[in-house]
Amino acid sequence: MATISGPLTGDDKTTTVQALQGALMDLIDLSLVAKQSHWNVIGSHFRPIHLQLDEVTDLAREHADTVAERIVALGANPDGRAATIAKSTKLPQPELGWIEDGKVVATFTDLLDGMSRRMRERIDATEESDQVTQDILIAVTQDIEKQRWMFQAQR
C-alpha cells in the first residue's frame, strides 16, 4: 500500500495536523448548521438570512476541502466522518423546527465569534510549525470574521 509523506515531521507535523483537524471539524459542522438553519429560518428577514446561510455553507465547504487536502499534503489523514464531528463539535446546534430570523442572527453571530477565536488560536499554534498552513487558516478566519460582521450588523 502506498502512503503519502509530507514536508513536516515530529512536533511540527503533530501541531499543524491538530490545528487543521480542528479547523476541519469546525468547517464541516458549520456547513451543516448553516444548512439546517437555512431550511428552517422564518420571519420578516427570511430572504436575506436564507441567502446568507447559503454563502456560509459554500465558504465552509470550500475551506473544508482546502484544509482536508492540506492535511493529506502533510502526510496525514483528515477525519470528516459524521461520528467524529458529532463527538467533537464545538458549535452550538440549532434547535429542531422553525427558527425565528432574529434568533438565527444572534446564534450565528455567537457561533462565528467562537469559531474566530478558535481559528486565531490555530493561527498562533502554526506560526512556527508551518507558515503555509498558517496562511490557509488566516484565509479561513478572514471569511469567518466577515460573515460574523454581516450577521452582527443585522442585530
Image (cartoon, rainbow, N blue to C red):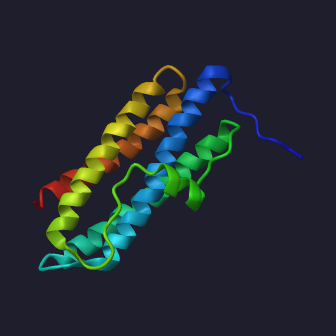
x then y, percent, for residue 153: 12, 56
Q: Which residue is at 61% across, 50% downward?
A: 79
Identify which residue, 47 or 99, lies in the foreground.
99
x then y, percent, for residue 114: 30, 45
Residue 90 sits above or below residue 126 on the image: below
Q: Which residue is at 40% across, 58% downward?
A: 30
Quadrant housing residue 82: bottom right
Q: Which residue is at 15% across, 79% downward?
A: 43
Q: Quadrant of the C terminus?
A: bottom left
Residue 145 sits above or below residue 52 on the image: above
x then y, percent, for residue 23: 47, 44
Residue 46 sits above or below residue 22 on the image: below
Count of marks, rendered view: 0
On the rendered structure, is 89 left or right of 152? Answer: right
Identify which residue, 57 or 43, lies in the foreground.
43
Quadrant housing residue 127: top left
x then y, percent, for residue 24: 51, 48
Q: Which residue is at 45% across, 35% downward?
A: 135
